[in-house]
Amino acid sequence: MAQAPITAKGAARLRAELEELKSVQRPAVIAAIAEARDHGDLKENAEYHAAREQQGFIEGRIKQLESELSHSQVIDTASLNAGSRVVFGAHVVLADVNTDEEKTYQIVGDLEADIRQGMIAISSPVARALIGKNEGDSVAIEAPGGVSEYEIVEVSYRD
């Protein structure tokens, strides 16, 4: 299995979530199950069934995070410096050619992508169109609404 790239910041965030699940949420749901068992008949005990369902979600997320972290390659984006060329971890400022509206994105691994925070997955159409381009280049990005033309205003590498 190929290793998926992830930023050091993203890996730290996933490790923190994993630690929270293991040390806080897992013991809490185990206690809730024990308390629900004390209420008697388990067939009609909604608290017990809800706690067991929650336990299943927590255990599934723990396994998912452990697997993803073990199959990922952590890349320190602060130490990367490809100059004005766009590579993994780059913070890119794009200007829409038609409206001059600017957008800022960081190209990150699939595991940590969050468009609300301006973090786009390296496998996304936008990132694939940007990789290898330089500051000042124009790029056409194909989206469901049609093709959009952008100019790369700035490329930077920071944490």
Image (cartoon, rainbow, N blue to C red):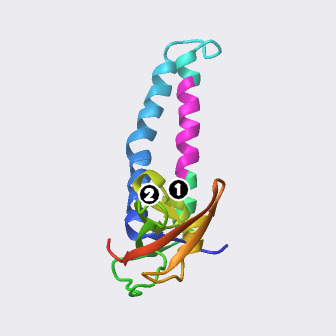
- The first of marks 2 and 1 along the sequence is 2
The residue wearing badge 1 is 65
Q: Residue at x 51, y 77 (%)?
A: 138
Which secondary structure dominates the residues rendered in magenta? helix
* Number of marks in picture: 2
Residue positioned 49% across, 81% down in the render: 137
> Given the image, on which type of amino acid does mark 1 rest?
Leu
Which residue is tagged 2? 14
Q: Tell me, yes or no, whether the two marked residues, 2 and 1, touch with CB atoms within 8 Å.
A: yes
Q: Is residue 89 visible?
A: no
Asked whether 57 falls inside the magenta stretch, the response is yes
| Residue at x 57% of width, y 54% of height | 64
Q: Nearer the viewer, residue 73 or 24?
A: 73
The spot of residue 73 in percent (x, y) is: 51, 74
Q: Which residues are magenta?
A: 50-62
Picture quarter containing residue 89?
bottom left
Whether 102 is drawn above or below 64: the answer is below
| Spatial CA span between label 2 and label 1 | 7 Å
Above or below, 55 relative to 103 = above
The image quadrant that residue 56 belongs to is top right
Q: Nearer the viewer, residue 38 or 3?
A: 3
**Residue at 58% across, 73% down:** 129
Secondary structure state at the residue bearing disc 1: helix
> Helix, strand or loop at disc 2?
helix
Query: Where is the N terminus found, in terms of image quarters?
Result: bottom right
Residue 136 lies, in percent from the top left, at 43, 81
Left or right: 143 in relation to 37: right
Q: Position of residue 156 (x, y in %)?
A: 35, 77
Q: Does the magenta segment cover residue 69?
A: no
**Amino acid of disc 2:** Leu
Estimate the x, y position of residue 75 in percent, counting from the top left. Answer: 44, 76
